[in-house]
Amino acid sequence: MPIVNRMSDLQAEIAAWRQDLHAHPELLYDVHRTAALVADKLRAFGCDEVVTGLGETGVVGVIRGRKAASGEVRTIGLRADMDALPIEEETGLPYQSTTSGNMHACGHDGHTAMLLGAARYLAETRNFAGTAVVIFQPAEEGGNGAERMMRDGLLDRFAIDQVYGMHNRPGLPLGQFSIRSGPSMASTDRIDITIEGKGGHAARPHVAIDSLLIGTQLVGQLQSIVSRTIDPLDSAVVSICEFHAGNAHNVIPQRVSLSGTVRTLKAETRDLIERRMHEITEGVARMTGARIALRYQRQTPVLVNHEAQVATAAGIAAEVVGNHNVQVGVPPVMGGEDFAFMLQARPGAFINVGNGDSAPLHHPAYDFNDEAIVFGTSYWIRLVETVLPA
């Protein structure tokens, strides 16, 4: 396949971009170096427009094909994320993070490099009709950068008809893709709970209101929502991941704080869990005499892939790697992804590309597999040329 061959020729150069990004990770919206590098390359490639500062630090490149599109779809958006994670890297690689406490532990360096490679090719060949919009987004890791770019007019300003995303997946063999229609990734919500009891001496618990004991009871009650309120055939996760209490071995603490996450694949399940959490915290407060405050923050919605666009994406992936290397209808995962906001507003699909036998995402030993560049970049190019045929 000519595109795959061309990407093989460019693979070493794209990998060098990726490794440079890996060595200089930036968090959330503070991706100024990364965004500047992306914008400079898009200009050097000859993009028709390069827009910076969208969604604070997002970058958009516009590439127009050889002729105007005559079909229903005139413009498609391709999105990559740019931000890293607050993790201390433990890979020992020559291009290991130079910023203590930050690392590209989710492969966004690879996502950015692959989309840059596709932009270079598309700007050179322009073998399509209509417009390809390459979107480089900040703050996917908990900052809802996709929603922020949309609030700044991303989809309407560039008249995007369909939008597509891609993520690497450790454990999926190199040279394979996976995708599913419908709910594919979970909604992600954050919970923060403060328990205000009555502190006192550990030898006199009867005159205190033990916020620590109440906290342990509350954890058990909240975990029981999934096992005793949610249909066993539904999917939901409640995880309490932080518990802060006390600073002395003989003092009953006055205050305890908890925080965690809620994941669901259905809007109604999300509503039910939020309601039950308020009911449980209010009930425990009445029972114990403590004051309990629950803050429930909805973050990203369920990522729902559109059936027609999934069929298109799977067909294009099969062109790149062969039918036997494309898994369609894989189970959903309970991880979250803010690309869900874009899929709420426009038809599109989110696909996974194999990262091979690597450490898992968000792990200090993780590294994006540069051998995946050929497959991911070729997919992006064929997607544009197929959806917007010249």
Image: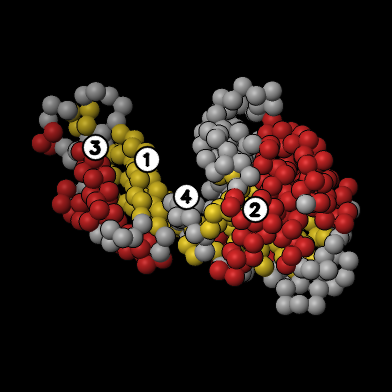
Q: Which residue is mark 3?
A: 212
Whole-number angstrom distance, CA of label 4 to CA of label 2:
28 Å
N-terminal-most mark, 2 or 3: 3
Whole-number angstrom distance, CA of label 4 to CA of label 3:
30 Å
Closer to the observer: label 4 or label 3? 4
The location of residue 170, given as percent across then percent down, is 54, 40
What residue sits 67% from the left and 42% below the top? 372
* Amino acid type, mark 4: Gly
N-terminal-most mark, 1 or 4: 1
* Amino acid type, mark 2: Gly
Left or right: where does residue 294 sit relative to residue 12?
A: left
Which element carries disc 3, helix, strand or loop?
helix
State yes or no: discs 2 and 3 in contact (Cβ < 8 Å). Answer: no
What residue sits 42% from the left and 60% below the top? 265
What residue sits 79% from the left and 68% below the top? 389
State yes or no: discs 2 and 1 in contact (Cβ < 8 Å). Answer: no
Q: Which residue is mark 4?
A: 335
